[in-house]
Image (spheres, grey):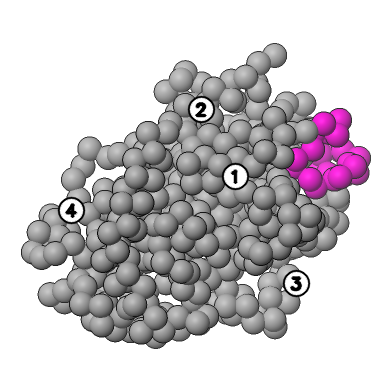
């Protein structure tokens, strides 16, 4: 069960494929908008309400992405009603749909329903995350809002209380659903997915590379860092028009900001074009849900839509992106230098980590992004030999990991009667 953008759904497709290959039955519950995407990868699909994903279709959401307080307050007021509908769908899928009879529920944090559905069914719930936002540690602060990395170790664990905001926003909605639909009482630590109904530690699967982020020593044994959950590399080559562009000159720079649009996508696109011109680099622009205008075509610019980044990124001189967990994982695996331009949430955390690993220059936050600054960062990423070597070395280690097999093995142990 997963909720979020494509980056939150695609790893679950890869995990589902791994489970199917191992002989298990799988149903992937995700927002309706991803029905074709999931089915196209041969995974049984059960659609749930898009819920707060509809906010991504609202131009006003750009204000939330860029941090305007009035837009944030508007979002808080509208989201509980959206989650009421989503919770109803989740229970229908689990109790009467293709998910009935499951032995285990694997869920991300955003969908909220996962641990409660599992409790009602009397089966284990496994929290599965592409980012380390739930399990506290002394080694780094909570990645949820881009906190500074210089906090003392004693304060780092305390910052993970930021996840309590979920309970504060949706606690009453979930309580009513538990009582009225599931017939369950209020639960101690009622919305903490790290806790089983008996208050023991729930298992957690971290779907990122231990080579990128080594597991902290103070994480409990219930936490498994498996490696990334990548889809198998497609047998299909890149489309001919992309191959023609790649073959017509020096390796270009990829720029794409996924689902992050900001308040003015046209201005963002113009800024990217100017930065590439200043850096003297050819450009591939990746489309998202409105992040950049990929319709622009020129001799030195190519816009692309739905393309296999696992095949595209290794052909780039550098990869410029927003720091979403899915995109940054693919960028690490590509072995190419990066430039990370974070918007919100965990993106500043990954941007700092990429810089700390020596595979990217200093982060370029979107709210301060300029053509000159981005051009300078692109120039560094494409000319620094130490950065190129570090990116290639880290990419080799990430590709050598088998996160899917590790996750499947962990789930088989958890689901054993």
Q: Is residue 17 left or right of residue 106?
A: left
Of the image marks 4 and 3, the number of the one nearer the N terminus? 3
Query: In terms of secondary structure, where does tag 2 sit?
Result: helix
Task: Please give the residue where the numbered disc 3 appears in the rendered image.
Answer: 77
Mark 4–mark 3 Cα distance, whole angstroms, equals 44 Å
Q: Counting other residues with Cα less than 10 Å from the Cα at mark 4, is it few (<14), some (14-19), or many (20 or more)?
A: few
Disc 2: CA contacts within 10 A as few (<14), some (14-19) or many (>=20): some
Mark 3 surroundings within 10 Å by alpha-carbon count, few (fewer than 14), some (14 through 19), many (20 or more): few
Q: Nearer the viewer, mark 4 or mark 3?
A: 4
Q: Secondary structure at mark 3?
A: helix
Which badge, 4 or 2, is on the more N-terminal residue?
4
Say left or right for 355 vs 254: right
Q: Of the residues tagged 4 and 2, which is closer to the observer?
A: 2
Q: Does the CB distance between marks 4 and 2 fall below 8 Å?
A: no
Q: Which residue is mark 1?
A: 129
- Residue tagged by mark 2? 406
Chief SS of the magenta region = loop
Q: Which residues are magenta?
A: 177-200
Kindly report the distance in space between the C-alpha atoms of the residues bearing marks 3 and 2: 40 Å
Residue 193 vertical position relative to residue 352 in the rendered view, above or below: above
**Regarding mark 1 in the picture, which secondary structure is present there?**
strand
């Amino acid at each position: 069960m997963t909720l979020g953008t494509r980056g939150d759904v695609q790893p679950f497709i890869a995990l589902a494929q791994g489970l199917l290959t191992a002989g298990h039955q799988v149903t992937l519950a995700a927002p309706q908008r991803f029905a074709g995407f999931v089915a196209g990868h041969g995974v049984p699909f059960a659609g749930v309400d898009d819920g707060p994903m509809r906010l991504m279709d609202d131009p006003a959401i750009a204000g939330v992405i860029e941090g305007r307080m009035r837009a944030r307050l508007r979002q808080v007021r509208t989201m509980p009603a959206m989650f009421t509908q989503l919770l109803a769908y989740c229970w229908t899928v689990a109790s009467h749909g293709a998910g009935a009879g499951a032995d285990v529920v694997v869920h991300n944090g955003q969908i909220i329903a996962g641990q409660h559905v599992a409790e009602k069914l009397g089966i284990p719930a496994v929290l599965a995350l592409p980012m380390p936002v739930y399990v506290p540690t002394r080694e780094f602060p909570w990645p949820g809002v881009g906190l500074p990395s210089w906090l003392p170790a004693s304060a780092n664990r305390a910052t993970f209380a930021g996840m309590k905001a979920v309970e504060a926003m949706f606690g009453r909605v979930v309580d009513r659903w538990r009582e009225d639909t599931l017939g369950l009482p209020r639960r101690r630590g009622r919305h903490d997915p790290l806790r089983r109904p008996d208050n023991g530690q729930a298992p957690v699967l971290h779907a990122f590379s231990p080579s990128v982020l080594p597991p902290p020593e103070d994480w409990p044994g219930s936490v498994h860092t498996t490696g990334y959950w990548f889809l198998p590399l497609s047998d299909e080559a890149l489309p001919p028009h992309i191959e023609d562009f790649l073959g017509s000159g020096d390796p270009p720079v990829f720029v794409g900001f996924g689902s992050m649009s900001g308040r003015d996508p046209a201005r963002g696109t113009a800024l990217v074009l100017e930065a590439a011109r200043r850096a003297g680099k050819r450009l591939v622009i990746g489309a998202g849900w409105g992040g950049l205008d990929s319709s622009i075509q020129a001799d030195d610019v190519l816009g692309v839509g739905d393309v296999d980044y696992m095949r595209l990124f290794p052909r780039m001189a550098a990869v410029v992106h927003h720091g979403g967990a899915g995109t940054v994982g693919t960028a690490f695996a590509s072995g190419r230098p990066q430039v990370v331009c974070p918007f919100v949430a965990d993106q500043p955390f990954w941007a700092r980590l990429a810089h700390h690993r020596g595979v990217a220059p200093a982060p370029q936050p979107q709210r301060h992004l300029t053509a000159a600054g981005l051009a300078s960062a692109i120039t560094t990423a494409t000319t620094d030999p130490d950065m190129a070597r570090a990116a290639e070395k880290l990419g080799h280690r990430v590709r050598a990991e088998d996160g899917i097999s590790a996750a499947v093995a962990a789930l088989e142990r958890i689901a054993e009667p």
